[in-house]
Image: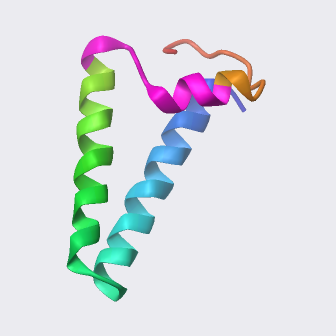
Amino acid sequence: MTLDRSVLAFAGLMVLLSVALTWWVSAYFVWLTIFVGVNLLQSAFTGFCPAATVFRKLGIRSGAAF
């Protein structure tokens, strides 16, 4: 799995997890959903993604975007 796919999979997992936590635990978990969305948006414009940096340090091979 490349870095790009890892970041997309992680972002999708975080969105689904935050929606589930919002539904079953507390409405305040909607802030996690908002944070993930804002991070995806800024990553699209700047090319910088904190998750990509962490995954790169874990040894996942580079993709085309990150």
For this rendering, which residue is in front, 2 or 19?
A: 19
Residue at 29 percent across and 13 percent down: it is 46
Q: Quadrant of the N terminus?
A: top right
Residue 51: within the magenta? Answer: yes
Residue 22 relative to residue 53: left or right = left
Residue at 38 percent across and 76 percent down: it is 21
Span highlighted in magenta in the image:
45-55
In the image as oriented, which residue stretches furthest toward the right? 59
Locate residue 57, reporting x and y percent.
70, 23
Residue 35 vertical position relative to residue 14 in the rendered view, above or below = above
Locate residue 4, reporting x and y percent.
56, 26
Residue at 47 percent across and 28 percent down: it is 50
Residue 43 relative to residue 61: left or right = left
Q: Is most of the magenta stretch helix, strand or loop?
A: helix
Residue at 78 percent across and 24 percent down: it is 59
Tell me where residue 48 sits by quadrant. top left
Locate residue 61, reporting x and y percent.
73, 19
- In this figure, which colouring scheme has been used for the structure? rainbow
Residue 31: within the magenta? Answer: no
Residue 28 vertical position relative to residue 6 in the rendered view, above or below = below
Residue 34 vertical position relative to residue 57 in the rendered view, above or below = below
Residue 49 vertical position relative to residue 9 in the rendered view, above or below = above
- Could you tell me how many numbered marks the image carries? 0
Residue 5 relative to residue 46: left or right = right
Tell me where residue 19 sits by quadrant. bottom left
